[in-house]
Structure formats: structure tokens, C-alpha cells
Amino acid sequence: MRRLSGILAMLLLSATPLLAASNQIVPNENLVTEGIPAIPATLADKVNRYTEFRAAGLLDWHPKKQEVLISTRFGDTNQVHLVHFAGGDRRQLTFFPDRITNAAFSPKDGKFFVFSKDTGGGEFYQNYRYDMTTGEVILLTDGKSRNSFGIWSNSGSLFAYTSTRRNGKDNDIYIVDPSTPSSDSKLAEVEGGGWEPLDWSKDDGKLLVAEEISINESYLWLFDVKTGEQKLLTPKGGAEKIAYESAQFSQDGRGIYVTTDRGSEFKQLNYLDLATGKFIALTSNIPWDVQSFDISEDGKLLAFVTNEDGISTLHILDLATKKEKKIPKLPIGVIGGIAWNKNNRDLGLSLASARATSDIYSIDIVSQKLERWTQSETGGLNTENFSEPKLVKWPSFDGKKISGFLYEPPAKFTGKHPVIINIHGGPESQSRPGFQGRNNYYLNEMGVAMIFPNVRGSSGYGKSFLKLDNGFLRQDSVKDIGALLDWIKTQPNLDADRVMVTGGSYGGFMTLAAATTYNEKIRCSLDVVGISNFVSFLERTESYRRDLRRVEYGDERDPKMREFLLTVSPTTKASNISKPLFVVQGQNDPRVPLNESQQMVATVKKNGSPVWYLMAKDEGHGFAKKKNQDFQFYATVTFIQQYLLGG
């Protein structure tokens, strides 16, 4: 059996060929490596089951049939699949080298769907039409600019989206009839990269649009679909910035349901009366963010999800009585997208937990029946034995309590456990207790504990906490990691002498900042698509997102802020790093450009400390293709073995 499993592993790695003579894993033609030592082919066999997890996400219900479009991976990337009934086979519909990010049926008859994808991770998304009868794919956008996925009109004949095609910077609003691509036309020119259509009025005469300035500041607008005339619904210029996120028209068109932090620390569900401009809070009794919601086709029920210390809770509100309806108990975890079937009784959702990869479920709110539509593979591993997270808290430098999730290895690993601190990106994201995928190998097979901190600036803990790292406060979030390192010293089951810091995107910056600030307290660090210099980052990130980032990090054009940004940039303090560093980057990254990793690698190399570098020519902001993810995983396991566990 050992011989057979080795052969199977080699077959599975056909996209990452092995050199027969040396029996080493060789990176595929799109990967560039520096400093990474030879990786034995036996490692692929050893870790293989942890690379074979699949996950499924709900995309859309068919408007006429009891079937769903889902996103999952059979080959190298996530594609669109059709599932005809709960527990049915997943029929793959799209076959592209790059992943599909969104898809939605035509609400009229479901004869085709619109989907979105980019090329090589560059995030210049294009929208396409897929014919369900012929399988024909037609490009709907210009093929060059960045286009949002958009939303269908109620009649199912129009699709509204945004595009940067005018100048590469501003997200103008466009409308197209996907059955006639030549109908594509610009509804309105706007200024800024944060515009997004949210909903159509019931008569399809008005378009509800959000304008995002930052995570803390956004506005709602009404656009007349015929004239392009714009009306601001939420006044500007108040004493305090307000965020408005998800929004949908009420059934009678007289109001809008919206999530907002207006008058609250958290994003509550509100009703906005369009005639009076008055807001009515509907969830003020819940001291947590409402992360998403969806209204049934008949306008009678509103399903919403709250984020309670990272765990999702589903609620269904009767809009006539304003009372919650009873629903079956769901597994504890993180809920993804929710969507009502047009039959007004079936609610679809995606759900993941520490012991279950993301899968799709539906709830019949009449019969109270919970059905599981997909059962994604877990590499033959019994996930019931996987580590479950513990919510931990520690005091930071200013007395504030910072929290995170701790995963510990199984009892067979005795003594103090080495630690990986994994910091989320955003910076406004939040580490939540979902499925950890490949990370489970570090826990189950290497005996490493993992901590996922939510430092100041993370979402989910109120808008005051969210703003605690903005601008000149940037270094305070780094100090939260310093406080975590001190807390680890106090834990009898954690080894403070063997700590690795890692993270992606903003978490990559935090990794590099921790490596330069707390070099003597860590063993090594692994930066994935991280910011190394805020000035060069802001000057080179794609123009459509530059102003949004300036609100968060500061405007590099201001001399005082520029000086500060350079002071806190990891490249400025790179000479402090004497511990091993591993840097991972996608060549086509539009958010954190390639230059950010290149300059960090070049700077740290001068210190004489070990530096590993992995760059993918066909990826962007993180690796999306399985063959690239696998090699990154093999290299990461090797890095951890050599520098965190070794020595």
C-alpha cells in the first residue's frame, strides 16, 4: 500500500513535475524561487491528504427549478457547478485556468447565467454570459478594464455593474441586457473607486447605489435608470462618519432595509423611510454586527446573519410583525452567502466550521427541514478529530483587551508547543473560527499551536475599535502583537522560544513589522503579499483603490504623513531582521504590487540572514491555483521544519 500511495501522489502532482533522477519536487514553469532548498518528493506523499480539501459556496438559486449554482474545485481552480437537488452530483459547467468569482442566473427563466473572472489574478474582472443549453460563453464587458460583478433587475432583462473603462480609476455605472451585449451603456460617470450597485426598485426605474469612502464612511444614492439623475439619500458632512453596507428596497418601494452603524458601535439592521428620511433600528437588541441579509421574493421575510465574537448566528425576521421566526439549529461556525429561493420558503446558505469545510445547506422555513446540498471531500481525513478554537484574550500596552482564536495540537504532542501567529489582512478583516484547511497539518502532524489574533483595527468589535489603527496610530496594532508575544510567555503549554509570525496582505505588513520590531522574540517569519513600504505601496497600488487606502493608512502626498509612513515601513527597519524570512508574492498583484516583496527581499538579503522567495507569474493577491498552492505548502512545511522546529 505504501508503494501504491506514493504512485498516486506522483500522479496527483502531474502539474508540479518531479525530477526522477533526484526525486525532488520541482516548481512548475510559472513559479520563480530563490533561496528555497531542494524539497524531497516524499514530502508530497506525506502531506497529500491535507492538500485535497474541497469547499463549496452558494452562488445562486435557479429561478424556476429547485437547483443551485455553486462554486467548487475539481481541478486547479474554483469553477461554476450545477447541483440538481440536495446531495446531488456537482456538474461542472465552466472550465477555465482562472477561478470564477461570482455567478447568477437570469431571474427571468434561468436559460443563462452571468459570471465573473479575471486573468492571472490581476483582478481586472470581466463579465460573461453562459448559455445553459449550448454552453456558449459570450464576453459582456470590454475585456480590458476592471468591472464589478453587478446585480440583476427584477424583470431579469438588465444587469447593472461598475467599470473603470473611462479612465482606469473611477467606477462608473453601466447597464447591459446580457441577452444583447451590444446594449451595454453608461448610466452615470462618478468619482472614486468605491461605487457599487446594491438593488433595483421593484419597477426597475431606480437603482440603489453605495459610495464607499472608507470602511467607516459610505453613502447611499438613488439613480434614475432612464435619466441617470442622482439623489443622495444619506447626508454628508456630519460630525461623525457613518457606514452603510448591504441595502435592499422594501416590497412596497417606500423604504430601504440597510445595515449601518448610524447611532451605534455596531452595524445594525435599519429601515429607512424614503419619504421622511427617518431611520428605524430593527436589531438594537443585538450588540454585534449584522454581516449580511436577504429579503424573500414576496417581501415578507428577512433573513440576516450576525457576527457574534466571530461566530455566525442566523435570524429570520417576519417584516409584518417584526418578530423572529423559529428555525432549526445550525452547526456552530461561519455562514457565508445567504439567498432566498423564489418560492419564499427555502433559504440557502454556505457554512464552515473548524471541523467542516464550507458546504451548502438550505432551510425550509415552513417544514423546518435542514438539508445539506454538498458534502465536500476532506482528503480522506476524519475532521472530527481536528482542533477546535478557543477564544483567548490578552491585555495590550494601553490596557485594551485584544482577542484571538487559539488552536492547539492533539494530546500526543506533549510539553510546550511551538507557536504560529497568523495575522489576517484587510486591515479591516477578522479572523473567524472557520475551516483551517492545510493549517491542520501544522497542528495535527507537526505539533504546532496556532493563534489567529484580531488586533485593533479588526472588524466585528465596534467602529471605535475599527478606527484604532488608522493613520498615525498604525504602530499600535503592531504593539498588540508584542503584547501577544508577552502573553505567550505566561502560558504553560506554549513555547515562547519557538514562535513564527505569518500573514497575508496587511497581515503580511504586520508580519514584516513584527519581524523588524520583535526580532529577538521570534524564530522566523513568513510574509505573503505584504506591504513593505507604505509610500511605494500607495504610489503603485492600482489607481481605482488608491484613495480608499489613503483613508486607512494616510496620504503619502502630505509631507508629515509621508515621513511617518516611511518611519513605520518595514524596509526602513529591515536591518533589524536577523531571523529567517520567507516571502511569497504573485506577479500580477494589483493591490500590493510585486515591487513590495522584491525590495524587502533585496534589503533583508544584505543582513546575511536566510531569505526564501517564491513568486508566481500567473497569480495575483495570493495563490488561487492548486498547483501553486501545493508548492507554497511544501515550501512552508519545509521552512517551519527547518527554522521553527529545528535548531
Image: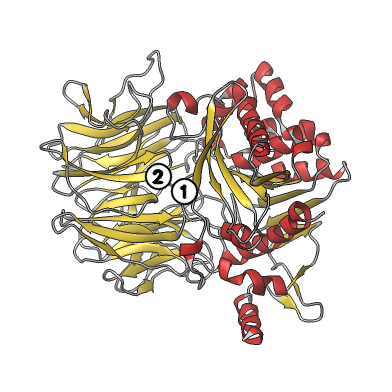
Closer to the chain start, of discs 2 and 1, is 2
- Indicate the quadrant where residue 132 lies: bottom left
Report how far apart the C-alphas of labels 2 and 1 lie in the structure: 7 Å
Residue found at x 32% / y 44%? 313
Residue found at x 29% / y 73%? 133
Q: Out of 23 and 396, give the one closest to the viewer.
A: 396
**What kind of residue is marked 1?**
Pro
**What kind of residue is marked 2?**
Ile
Q: Position of residue 154 (x, y in %)?
A: 20, 49
Give the answer, above or below, for where 385 lies relative to 327.
below
Image mark for residue 311? 2
Q: Position of residue 90 (x, y in %)?
A: 37, 72
Left or right of 314 in this view: 128: right
Q: Is mark 2 in CB contact (under 8 Å) with mark 1?
A: yes
Give the answer, above or below, for where 545 lies relative to 473.
below
Residue found at x 67% / y 16%? 560
Left or right of 319 in this view: 452: right
Locate the N terminus by quadrant: bottom right
Left or right of 259 in this view: 74: right
Left or right of 272 in this view: 242: right
Mark 2: secondary structure? strand
Q: Position of residue 318 (x, y in %)?
A: 15, 41
Image mark for residue 433? 1
Q: Residue furthest top?
A: 239
Residue 179 visible? The answer is: no
Q: Out of 551 and 308, give the one closest to the viewer.
A: 308
Residue 415 visible? The answer is: yes
